[in-house]
Amino acid sequence: LAKTTQPISMDSYEGQEVNITCSHNNIATNDYITWYQQFPSQGPRFIIQGYKTKVTNEVASLFIPADRKSSTLSLPRVSLSDTAVYYCLVGGDQTGANNLFFGTGTRLTVIP
Amino acid sequence: GAVVSQHPSRVICKSGTSVKIECRSLDFQATTMFWYRQFPKQSLMLMATSNEGSKATYEQGVEKDKFLINHASLTLSTLTVTSAHPEDSSFYICSARPRLAGGWGDTQYFGPGTRLTVL
């Protein structure tokens, strides 16, 4: 299993850029990296997914170094509504199961 | 797109009764659906993997006779908590993996969750 390690919590002021790093030293060749956001009493929401280098969408960027042993989720100019728990999952194709196991996640608190 | 619904969103029941939770993929077909349980302030724990037309695969420590899973179609999976007890009170979340994963990777889409309270 490609276990993931993230900081338990982070605080940030509104308007700042937040970078959350996830370590996944045992990532396999076919594994992708997926990040989810979860608010209290809600199901996780897909944020972004990547395999290597950089991926950007309308809400976040994902940076993956060449060795793929870590990844960084970047949230530009966070607002209070970004306060949530963020999970990174690492997993493969339809036959893979690694991405089904959630780590501790990172609890982000945005401060006014 | 990629919307997953759950019903009910909240249920309160008496100890000893059974509760059924439905998980539906609304705009895609899902060959595989997953059921998770989440206790307060904790991460999601995978309970079982549900494949359409076949028996579910349960994670170690999850009682298959207590948590009955049925995946009758490509858009519906149900979780029945039988003879529920207060320790079964939790937040139950399902997810679905599209039959044809568009793009690349292996993305799961999650339902909104069901809060079960057993008195």
Image: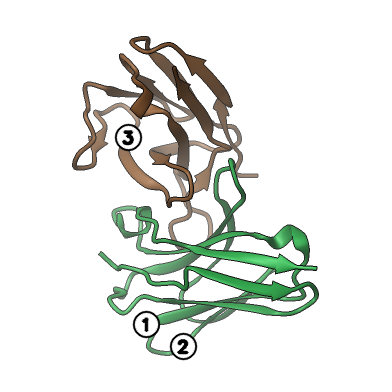
Residue B60 screen position, x and y as percent = 19, 42
Residue A67 screen position, x and y as percent = 37, 88
Asked if the residue under mark 2 is in contact with the one under mark 1, i.e. CB atoms within 8 Å, the reply is: yes
Name the side, left or right, on which A22 lies relative to A109.
left
In the rendered view, would you say B9 is above or below A61? Answer: above
| Mark carried by residue A69 | 1
Kindly state the secondary structure of the residue where label 2 is placed: loop
Which lettered chain is shown in green?
A
Q: CA distance from mark 1 to mark 2?
A: 7 Å
Foreground tag (1 vs 3) = 1
Kindly state the secondary structure of the residue where label 1 is placed: loop
Q: CA distance from mark 2 to mark 3?
A: 35 Å
* The hue in which chain B appears in the rendered picture of the protein: brown
Question: Is the residue at mark 1 from the same chain as the one at mark 3?
Answer: no
Question: Mark 3 — residue?
Answer: B51
At a point 43% along the width and 42% down the height, the residue shown is B38
Parent chain of label 1:
A
Residue A62, located in which quarter of the rendered image?
A: bottom right
What amino acid is at disc 2?
A: Pro
Front residue of B101 and A6: A6
Number of numbered tags placed on the structure image: 3
Residue B5 screen position, x and y as percent = 58, 32
Question: Mark 2 — residue?
Answer: A65
User: How busy is the neighbourhood of tag 3: few (under 14 within 10 Å), some, or many (20 plus)?
Assistant: many
